């Protein structure tokens, strides 16, 4: 009985210590536009949270706000630039920084730059990638690039079946409102239609747009197959992602805690690398089982030719970086 009492006392003391620690803990709000469940980016968020809370012993907690609760990527970034401090860590599409002066990040959204996941991860592990992550601070943006990852190649999905590049002509397609993406759509002969991500399902359902594009896992997790059951696997760009931490968030932390944030980001992206291919294959099989029509683009040459203009226009003056990326294959 005495032994049992001692065990209970120790447990109570541990719980009290944990509660006291949690009470004085710093909480970082993590914004994610997609669902956590079933997505690669959800796995990244959970891995980051798990590792940072473990490393910090609970002195730094992570509050994941998914499903676009904090706004879409564009809104969250605009709010941060406007001085908003409600978000600390953001998972963004790596090309989102193009419009804010991070010129090198343009290579992460140009069509048909990366030939495979292996090619991309060689880039991630290179000094070139580190220089790109540092660019946001170099151009004076109020956040720090932590780490790169990916959520799979991006493909078109539509209300009507698309088999060839000619089938895209005249279709109203939603892509991110970014000059590279809109230029790619124009090169393919389609019409860019601006729609927020949160309104995309309804816009497909009502015919405001005919098609859109996402990595396979996001296509499935957002139930887009219900309103656009045709998937065309053209892999026009890789869904490159980046974790950023705001200056305001890092100002709350000690140097030791900042190092933990970086370690947690690196860990999360390693988990991403380990799971992304399997998750894509699993999602594709589920879509097929649901009755979706999946078409693979075997010859990408016509697609590369059609989008050559937007690629050349955006690498002007930075051809050496483009050659360095290609050399990593």
Image (cartoon, grey):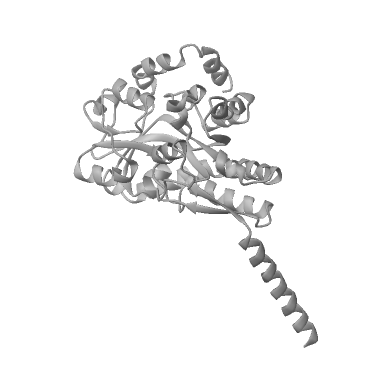
Residue 146 quadrant: top right
Please count the marks in the image.
0
Q: In this view, does 217 lie to the left or right of 139?
A: left
170 over 210 or under it: above or below: above
Rendering coords of residue 93 (x, y %): 46, 35
Residue farthest to the front, as pictured:
83
Pick whichever, 95 or 27, lies toward us.
Answer: 27
187 over 227 or under it: above or below: above
Q: Which residue is drawn at 53% across and 25% down?
A: 139
Q: Which residue is drawn at 29% across and 44% down?
A: 199
Q: In this view, does 259 lie to the left or right of 312?
A: right
Residue farthest to the bottom, as pictured:
1
Rendering coords of residue 45 (x, y %): 53, 48
138 over 1 or under it: above or below: above
Rendering coords of residue 174 (x, y %): 30, 34
Residue farthest to the top, as pictured:
317
Pick whichever, 122 or 295, lies toward us.
Answer: 122
Residue 181 quadrant: top left
Q: Is residue 104 in view?
A: yes
Rendering coords of residue 293 (x, y %): 31, 42
Q: Which residue is drawn at 51% across and 29% down?
A: 116
Q: Is residue 109 in view?
A: no
Residue 262 quadrant: top right
Pick whichever, 110 or 59, lies toward us.
Answer: 59
Q: Residue at x 39, y 40 (%)?
A: 75
132 over 148 or under it: above or below: above
On the rendered image, what quadrant is the C terminus found in?
top right
On the rendered image, what quadrant is the N terminus found in?
bottom right
């Amino acid at each position: 009985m005495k032994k049992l009492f001692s065990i209970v006392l120790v447990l109570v003391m541990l719980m009290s210590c944990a509660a006291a620690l949690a009470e004085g803990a710093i909480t970082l709000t993590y914004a994610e536009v997609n669902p956590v469940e079933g997505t690669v980016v959800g796995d990244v968020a959970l891995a980051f949270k798990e590792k940072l809370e473990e490393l910090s012993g609970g002195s730094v907690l992570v509050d994941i706000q998914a499903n676009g609760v904090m706004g879409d990527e564009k809104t969250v970034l605009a709010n941060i630039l406007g001085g908003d401090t409600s978000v600390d860590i953001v998972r963004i599409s790596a090309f989102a920084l193009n419009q804010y002066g991070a010129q090198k990040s343009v290579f992460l959204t140009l069509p048909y730059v990366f030939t495979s996941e292996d090619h991309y991860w060689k880039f991630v592990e290179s000094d070139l990638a580190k220089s790109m992550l540092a660019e946001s601070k170099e151009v004076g943006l109020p956040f720090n690039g932590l780490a790169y990852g990916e959520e799979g190649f991006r493909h078109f999905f539509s209300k009507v079946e698309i088999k060839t590049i000619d089938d895209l002509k005249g279709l109203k397609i939603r892509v991110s409102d970014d000059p590279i993406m809109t230029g790619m759509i124009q090169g393919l002969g389609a019409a860019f239609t601006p729609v927020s991500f949160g309104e995309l399902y309804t816009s497909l359902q009502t015919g405001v747009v005919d098609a859109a594009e996402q990595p396979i896992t996001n296509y499935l997790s957002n139930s887009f197959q219900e309103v656009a059951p045709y998937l065309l696997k053209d892999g026009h760009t890789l869904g490159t992602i980046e974790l950023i931490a705001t200056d305001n968030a890092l100002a709350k932390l000690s140097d030791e805690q900042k190092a933990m944030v970086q370690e947690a980001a690196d860990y999360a992206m390693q988990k991403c690398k380990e799971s992304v291919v399997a998750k894509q294959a699993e999602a594709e099989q589920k879509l097929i089982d649901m009755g979706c029509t999946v078409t693979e683009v075997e010859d990408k040459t016509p697609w590369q030719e059609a989008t050559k203009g937007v690629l050349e226009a955006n690498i002007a003056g930075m051809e050496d970086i483009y050659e360095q990326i290609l050399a990593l294959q």
